[in-house]
Structure formats: structure tokens, C-alpha cells
Image (spheres, rainbow, N blue to C red):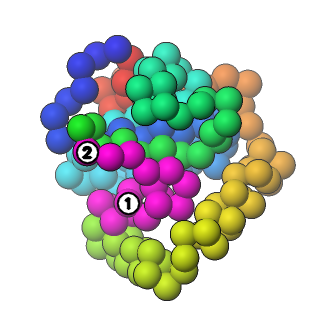
Amino acid sequence: MDALEKNKKIILFDGICNLCNSSVQFVIKRDKKDIFRFASLQSEPGQKLLAERGIDPEKTDSIVLIEPDVAYYTKSQAAIEIASELGGGWSFLRVFEYILPVTLRDLLYDFIAHNRYKWYGKKDQCMIPGPGLKAKFLK
């Protein structure tokens, strides 16, 4: 795996999930400050980053946001942290951190995650970034 770039946050996502892939594309388009790098949960770098944090890859189907040498976030907290970095109106989503307890936020997150293949479908293999996006994905 390439050395992690300084000041970059890593988003681990389900590489075969259509909803997850659409979410990654959404973040890439709005990542004006070039904050994020990406790896699928199924990839070698994704598996290594999970293991380093003691996250069982067999028991997570959550998005994971990693701030190297700082912290990592899963489920609804990861989504809120990512949205807040996108700036503009997206940082407003942080309000859910204060009005909904994490248990309720994660229940909603888990409900969507559990049904994501049924509702949005899945791919046979992880997405392969085009030449313009390759630098944003960990190898």
C-alpha cells in the first residue's frame, strides 16, 4: 500500500454496492479541498486499514472514515464527518449529531445498509476508477 498522504482522510466503502459507489462519486464531485482518499472495504488497502484499527471486516458493512493518527468513525458519525468536510450546506448535517442520539442515527443507518443491495443493487466487482480519479484511490 502506498504511504498515506499527510492531511488526507480515507473513506472505506463497500466497493460492490451501487449506493456506496454513488456516494463516493458524490463526495468526489464536492471535495473541492481534495481532502479525501478512497479504498473499498474489499481491497487490500481497505482490509489492512481495518485490521490496523481492530475492525473485523466480516462484521462491518459500514462506511469508515479514517483520519490517520487521529481517529476513525463508522456508520452515521462517518457520514456526518464526511458531510461536514464538504462545506456549504452539507455541513448543516452536523445538526443531527446534536438532535438525534447516536443509537437512533445508527439504527437508521443500519436499516439502510441492510437493505442497500435490495434497493440499489450491487456490482459483480469493485468499481475501477478512471485515469482522472486513480490518484484518489489507495493502491
Q: Is residue 90 above or below residue 99?
A: above
C-alpha separation, residue under disc 1 versus residue under disc 2: 13 Å
Label 2 environment density (alpha carbons within 10 Å; few <14, some 14–19, many ≥20) = few
Q: Which residue is mark 1?
A: 81
Q: Nearer the viewer, residue 6 or 126?
A: 6
> What span is colored magenta in the figure?
70-86
Q: Which residue is mark 2?
A: 70
| Residue visible at 54% across and 80% down in the picture | 100
Q: Quadrant of residue 84?
A: bottom left
The amino acid type of the residue labelled 2 equals Val
| Residue visible at 33% across and 32% down in the picture | 136
Residue 104 sits inside the magenta stretch:
no
Q: Is residue 34 above or below residue 83?
A: above
Residue 78 sits inside the magenta stretch:
yes
Q: Is residue 130 above or below residue 92?
A: above
- Residue 131, can we see it? yes
